[in-house]
Image: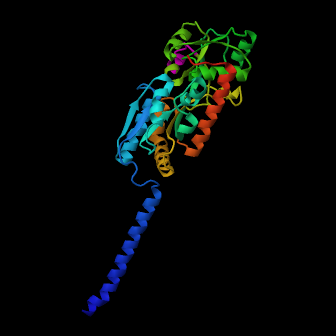
Amino acid sequence: MNTINRTLPWILRLAAALFAASAAQAAAAKAADPAPGFPSRPIRMIVPFAPQGPNDLLARMVGLKLTESWGQSVVVDNRPGAGTVIGTELAVRAPADGHTLLMVSLSTAVNPVLQKKLPFNTAKDLVPLINLAFSPNLLVTHPALAANNIAQLLALAKAKPGGVIFASGGSGSTTHLAAELLGLMGGVKMTHVPYKGASPATIDLLAGRVNWMFGTILPTLPHVKAGKLRALGVSSPKRTATLPDVPAIAETLPGFEAVSFYGVAAPAGVPGPVMAKLNAEMARIVNTPETREQLRLQGADAVGDSQAEFTVFFNSQMSKWARVIREAGIQAE
């Protein structure tokens, strides 16, 4: 009996210590998870583009990893049309609980200026969440053009106002905007020929019917390697790891930047803790070596920034391209 009495306090102290440790672990886990219980059902990722494009592929890549992390499916919902307006409207009308997200891009940022009337207010109805990745465009010329670098291209355009012809994937497209920015910053006027997509524009460039264009790296690079096109520069602020020997246009025109970005936004009103949880996990995913390598093979670079950083970037893109669109007199097709 005495042995039991002597042992019992020790057992109680041990139990109390174990309980305290368990409670501390539970508290730490709760503190590390800003939104316990989220997600409580499948997440819908709206992609306002057709399947197989870069936005779609990145959404599926990140969605698969989120499913593995949280045990809730991420359903990619492709809703192309009207220059991303259809998919964006679906997203802003969804409940603001974090279970509906939207892939956003430069198209989202320029629509308030390009589109005469939108069924939503981009600045008020969408909240930037994270920039997953960006991809520079590649300025390529037909080999017959007497320009081996950006400075020579601008000099040629100055000598022949309107005589240098560039193609794009459509009026108001990313490649068109990049070309207009080049003209504005370089102080030259060149003639724009819009096409219904990058493929027909590339075909005419290869045939020499136009002089140059901005193209996305992955489909354009094989033509450069084959000697059918000449690469003069990339549109990112610095050289890209995919093409380290091709100079950044900013090396000739300081401050030049015209990249395609692949971000995620949510309907306005999603609770801050939910946004923080989504941002942290997506940032972790895109910065894993596996994902970074997958992106590099697609000609893109991982970002994974904070919500505050992406908000500043997204807003700066809206104001920057609004200015370019107005100064260049660009109108949507």
Question: Which residue lies at the image location 43% right of the left edge and 60% below the top edge?
Answer: 29
Magenta-colored stretch includes residue 225 = yes
Residue 255 is situated, as x and y percent measured from the top left of the image, at 69, 31
Question: Which residue lies at the image location 52% right of the left edge and 15% below the top edge?
Answer: 226
Q: What stretch is highlighted in magenta?
A: 221-229
**Residue 229 in sight in this render:** yes
Q: Which of 6 and 196 is in front in this view?
A: 196
Q: Which of 273 and 156 is in front in this view?
A: 273
Magenta-colored stretch includes residue 27 = no
53 versus 194 height, above or below: below
Quarter of the image for the N terminus: give it. Answer: bottom left
Residue 313 in the figure: left or right of residue 11? right
Residue 116 in the figure: left or right of residue 49? right
Residue 172 is situated, as x and y percent measured from the top left of the image, at 58, 21
Residue 228, picture quadrant: top right
Q: Nearer the viewer, residue 269 or 325?
A: 269
Residue 323 is situated, as x and y percent measured from the top left of the image, at 68, 27
**Residue 181 in sight in this render:** no
